[in-house]
Image (cartoon, rainbow, N blue to C red):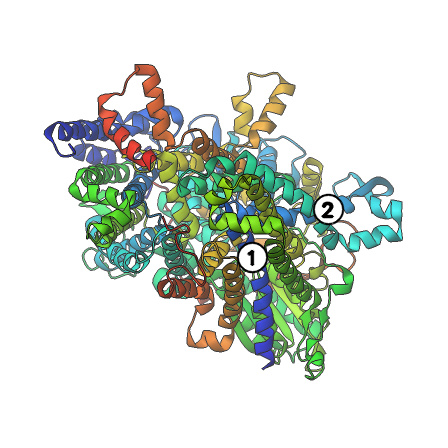
Amino acid sequence: MDFLDKDNLQNDLILIAIFAVAILTMPIWLEPFGASYPDLMQKFAIFGIFATGFNILFGLTGYLSFGHAAFLGVGSYTAVWSFKLLGMNPIPALIAAVIIAGVFALVIGFLSLRRTGIYFSILTLAFAQMCYNLAYSVLTPITNGETGLRVLRSDPRIFDGNGSDTGPLVASLFGIEMTGMAGFYFCAVVLILVSWLAIMIFRSPFGLMLKAVKTNQNRMGYTGLNTRPYALAAFVISGMYAGLAGALMCITDPLAGAERMQWTASGEVVLMTILGGAGTLMGPMLGAALIKYFENIFSAFNEQTLEHVFSFMPEGMRDATVSLAGLFVGEGWHLTLGLMFMIVVIFLPGGIIEGLRRLAKAVFGRKRPEQSHAARDDAAQTAR
Amino acid sequence: MSIIKTGTSRRTVLKGGAVFAGTALAAPHLFVRRASAADYLNAPTGSTVTLGFNVPQTGPYADEGADELRAYQLAVEHLNGDGDGGMLNTMKPTALKGNGVLGKKVEFVTGDTQTKSDAARASAKRMIEKDGAVMITGGSSSGVAIAVQSLCQEAGVIFMAGLTHSNDTTGKDKRANGFRHFFNAYMSGAALAPVLEKAYGADRRAYHLTADYTWGWTQEESIKNSTENIGWETVETVRTPLGAGDFSQYITPVLNSGADVLILNHYGKDMVNSLTQAVQFGLKDKQANGKNFEIVVPLYSELMAQGAGEAVKGIFGSANWDWKLKNPGTEAFVKSFGQKYGQPPSQAAQTCYVQTLLYADACERAGTFNPCAVISELEGFEFDGLGNGPTLYRAADHQCFKKVLVVKGNENPTNQYDLLEIVEEVPVEQVMYDPSIFGGELGSCNPGV
Amino acid sequence: MDQILLQILNGLDKGGAYALIALGLTLIFGTLGVVNFAHGALFMLGAFCAVGLYQLLTLEMVSIDPNNMTPWGTPAEIRQPYIEAWFGEAGSTMLNFAVPLSILVAIPIMLVIGIVMERGLVKHFYRRPHAEQILVTFGLAIVLQEIIKVWFGANPIPIPAPEAVSGSADIGSWFGFAENAISYPWWRLVYLLFSVAVICAVFAFLQFTTFGMVVRAGMADRETVGLLGIDIDKRFTIMFGIAAVVAGLAGVMYTPILPPDYHMGMDFLVLSFVVVVVGGMGSLTGAVAAGFLLGILQSFASMTEIKSIFPGIDQIIIYLVAVAILLVRPRGLMGRKGVMEG
C-alpha cells in the first residue's frame, strides 16, 4: 500500500509533466498524421476529458454506465444558456455546466445505484434516452430541438450583451476568442488539470475504496461499510467531468444539439474507455483520440485521395487497390472502426495501453518506471 | 469576426502564445501555411481551388449522400472542362468557360455528416481549417444544413445548401453566407394545395402525422395553412417520434377520426415506414365521408419512393426537380449523369450539381473567391437552363424561386427509375412569398478575416 | 372501444416482435452469460435473408431493347424475372410467397451464422469481463451491417407480403361490430400468430425434450451438469444457434411491415435490451411478458387522449416503465438472483 508515498508522488509529477508537454505540443507532432488542425485537437482534448471522467466511474468501481452522454448534453445546454443569459465568458459557463451536470448525476446516480450490474446499466441508459427524446421534441423551447441551441444577438447576455452587438458570438476569455488554436489551448489546459485531478483520485484512499467496491462489493458490505455513498460520489464526479466536456464543446463552438445525448454517444465513451484500456490512467484518452481520428480523418478519404496515394502503382493494380481500400475509408470508415474494436479486444485484452506496454516490454526488456502505475492499475483490472 | 482562426489570425495566436508561452512558440508553422496577405479566409494561392462536399456517407441517408457526391464529382469534372460539359452548355447567362474557376483547377475534399449536427460541423471545420476549402456544400437534413450554415457564416466561407426543405434554412435561421437552391415546405404547400383541390375537392378533412422535430413542424404548419385556404378542415395533427419504426399505433386512430385525407409530414425512413404501413392498414382502399380515402406525402424523393415500393402508387407529393422534365438543362444533365453512372440523377443530385455551378459562376463573375463579392453576385441573380426553368436567387433571403413540381407515384412504371410521374409544373408566382413572414436576419457577409 | 381494441392489437403485434428478439437475447444471457450486442444485427441479417431471396427470385434477364433509348443515350433494357421466364405461373407464385419461403432459407443460414459466431468468437469471451464482450460484439455488429450496406445499399428495400394477406381483415365483423369499423392488416395478424407460435415452440423445446431439459439444468447450474459428464458446451452452442434463428425469423417476418435497411438492427438493439432487463435477466417467460407489456403500453401512450395529458409521453414511455419496474423490482419482472449483477 504505497499509493501516497513520496516516491510515487514524484513519479506522478513526472508523468503529468510528460503528459502536459505531449498535449501542448500536439500541433507539432500531430502534423504528419494530418490531425494538427484546431477542431480535431479540441475534440481530442474534450473527449479525453469525457473518457477520463467516465473511467473514474467505470475503471475504478466497475459500474458500467450507459447514459453518460446525458451529462455531456446537460453540460452543453447549461453552457449555452450561460452564454445567452450571462455573456460569452467561458468561466461561468464551465462552472454552471459542472454544477448542473453534477446535480443531474446526483439524482440519476442516486436512483440508478440502487441496482448493480446490467440493471444499473439499463437504468442509466433509460434516463439518458428520456433526456434525449424530450430534448429533441417536447423540450424544444429550452433546447431548440433538432436545430440545436445557439446564442442569438437578441439574447440578454447581461455582462457583455448590450452595446457590443457587432462582436462575434463566440466565447471569449478576457478578450481571447475561444476558437481555433486559443480554444485548443484552453481545452488542453483544462484537460491537464483534470487529468491531474484524476490521478489524485486514483491514488487517494477514496480511489482505493472505489477499487475495493469493484473487486468485491459483498465483502465490503460484510465489513459493515456502506459502499453506495462511495459509488455515488464517483458517479457524480464522472458526471461532472462529462458536464465539463460538454461545456468545452460549446465554448469552442457555441451550439448544443440533442443528439449529443443519444445512446450511441453514451456507447461511444464506453468504447473509447475500453478500447484504450479501462482502469488505466491514459488509456481512455488514447481511445478517445483514436475514435475521433477515425471519425474525422478516415471518413474524409475519397477515391480521388486514394488514387493520389496509390499513384505509384501500375494502372490495373491501382484500380484494384483503390476499390479495395475504398471499402475501408470514406463511406466505409465504420467498417474499419468495427474491425478495430474486434481486433483490439480479441488480441489486446486491456486495450491499447496493454499493447503499448507489451511493445515497450519487447523493446526495453523491462517496464519503464513512469509506466509502473498504469501497469499496476492494469493488473488490478485484469485480475478481476 | 470569425469562429475559425487558422491562417490569418495572428492576434489570437499571439495572445494564446502569451498565455501558454513556450508551447505556443512551437505552433506557428501551422499558421504560416496560409498566412497570406489575402483579405478573406482560405484564399486559394496555388493553381487550384478547394471545395468541400459535406454529405451523409453513413446512417440512414447514406444512399442520398452517395448520389449527391456523384453529382458533385460530375460538376467538378464539367467545371474543369472534362466530360461533355453537362449543364455548362445550357446555363445562361454564364461566365464559366470550362477551364476551372478563375483559371484555377477545381479540387474537392469530402466528409461524412452522419446526419448529425456535431459530426457535420466537425467535418466542415476540418475542410475549412485543414483543407482550406473556400466553399462548403451538401447536407440531407435541415437540422444539419442549418448547423453547418451558421458555422460557415461564423467562419467566413460560403455555404451552398444541398437538400434541406425546412422553412427555417432561409427563414428564421437564414445567414448572409448561406444559399439554398432547393425549395421549402411553404412552397410545397402552395404548390400542392390547388392540385389537391382539383383532384380531391375542396371539402376534405385532413389528418396530419408529423415527425416531432422542427422540420416536421414547419412542414405541418405550411401544409395546414395552404390546405385550409382551399377549404379543407384539419381534424387532428399528431406528432410521432423520430425513427418510430412501427407507426401502427398512430395510424389506427386515423381510420375512425372522421378524416378522409392522411398527410404524412415525414421524411426518409420515417416516411417509407409510415406510408408502407398506412397502405397496409388499407387506408388507400377505404371510404370515409362518402369519398375515397387519400394519402398525401408533401415532400417526395426518388429514394423514398424506391424504399416504399408499391405503396407510393397514386400518391401526391411535391418535388424540386425530376429527371423526366423536358428542358435543355435537364436533358443535358441527365445525359452526362446517366452516361457516367448508368442511372438517372435524383433531385438531391440535381440541386447539389446546380449549387456548385452557381457558386463557380458567381466567383467567375466576381473575379475573386472573396465571399462578400461572391454573395453580391449571387444575390438577385437570375438564370435559366439549369433544369428548373427561369430562376431567381432572391437577395432578401438567399432562396431560389422557380417552378415547383407536383408529382404522383407512378401507377405503371416502365422501368425501375420511373417511380414518380410529373403532374404539374407549378409556376413560380404561385409559390412566391414575402421574405419577412418567417422572420430572421441575414446579417452581413463574413469573409473570415 | 374500437380504438382500445385496435391499440391492444397494435401492442400485441409490436410486443410479438420485441418478445422474439428479447427471447433470443435472453437465451444467450441465460445459457452463456454473454452480453450480445450483435443480436440486433442477427435480426437484421434475418431480414436480409428475405431480401436476398427476394432479389434472387426477381433476378432479371436483361436484354437490349432495339427500339428504345434511355434519356442518357444508352440502349434501353427489357427486364424479365428469370423465374417467370422459366417457370411461368409457378414462378410468379413463388415470387408472391417470397417472404414465407424465406423462412425455409433463413433457418439454416441463421443456424450456421449463430454457431459460427459462437465457436469462432463468442466462445473466447466467456471468462472475459462483460465490457469486453460488449465491445467485441458491438464491433461485430458494425462489421456485419457495413457488409450488408456494401452489398445492398443504405436505402430501405421494400418486400411485399403475399397478395392473399396484403390487405386488411375486417376484424370488427367477427365480434359483431359494424362493418369496417375495425380492420387490421392480415399480415400483422399473421405476424402475431407466427411470433406466438415461435415462442411456444421454443418453450416446448426446452420443456419437453431431453435436450431442452439438459439446457435448462445447465442454465441453473452449469458446473454440476458438467460434472455429470454431459457436454454442456456443445448444447449451449446449439442454443446460440437457435437464438440466432429466432432473431432471424423475427426479422424475416417483419420485412413487409418495415422495409429493411442495414441499420435496422441498431434501432432495435437498445429496445430489446430494455425488454430483456425489464423481464428479468435469465428469465424466458419474463422476456416474453415484458415484450408484450411494453408493446401494449407503447401503443396506449401514443393515443392522442393520453398525449394531451402528458405531452411527449409516447417518446419515453418504454424507458419510464423500465425505470419504474427496476426500482420497484430489483431484478425486473421475473429475474433470477445473481445473473448479470456483478
Q: In what quadrant of the picture does the C terminus of chain B appear?
A: top left
Q: Secondary structure at mark 2?
A: helix
The total of numbered circles placed on residues is 2
Which disc is residue B183 wearing? Answer: 1
Q: Amino acid at mark 2?
A: Leu
Between disc 1 and disc 2, the foreground one is: 2
**Left or right relative to B232: residue B136:** left
Mark 2: few/some/many CA within 10 Å (<14, 14-19, 20+): some
**Left or right relative to A365: residue C153:** right
Q: Amino acid at mark 1?
A: Phe
- Circles 1 and 2 on the same subunit: no
Q: Is residue A360 visible?
A: yes
Q: Quadrant of residue C17?
A: bottom right
Q: Is residue C81 visible?
A: no
Check disc 2 and report the residue beneath it: C53
Give the residue drawn at x 11%, y 31%. Answer: A5
Chain under callout 2: C
